[in-house]
Image: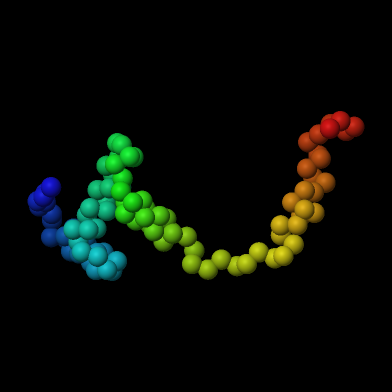
Amino acid sequence: MIVTLKLPAEFEARLVSEAEAKGVAAGELVTEYLYRIVPVRDQRQMTAEDIERGFEKIADLLPTALPPLPDDATSRENIYTREDDWDRPSGRI
């Protein structure tokens, strides 16, 4: 489907500038924005490419470098502590 939009010059300039910054064509950027605001009615119509694009957008939102967890971060002692017993009445399990 082809849609023609009449945009104010200032808005068009901002759109073109943002598209250039993202390295995409202005039309692709408009399509991306439309996908965000128009709800997908039937999820089964999504293609594998649509799903992959969605995951890539999510990945772009994540920090690129996360610090590694210390070795003891996932030890049983650090996961299950005495504080876990605080909510239980004394003498009962």
Q: Is residue 43 above or below residue 23?
A: above
Q: Is residue 89 left or right of residue 49?
A: right
In this orientation, which residue lies closer to the viewer: 14 or 23? 23
Task: Report the colour scheme.
Answer: rainbow
Residue 26 on image: x %, y %: 20, 61
Residue at 74% over, 62% down: 72
Residue 21 falls left or right of residue 64: left
Residue 9 lies left or right of residue 60; in this view the side is left
Residue at 88% from the left image edge and 33% from the top image edge: 90
Q: Residue at x 90, y 32 (%)?
A: 91
**Image quarter hosting the C terminus:** top right
Percent of width and height locating residue 1:
13, 47
Q: Relative to residue 78, is residue 50 drawn left or right?
A: left
Viewer-side residue, 52 vs 38: 52
Give the residue at x 27% y 68%: 23
Residue 86: name its quadrant: top right
Q: Between 38 and 14, which is closer to the camera in this rendering?
A: 38
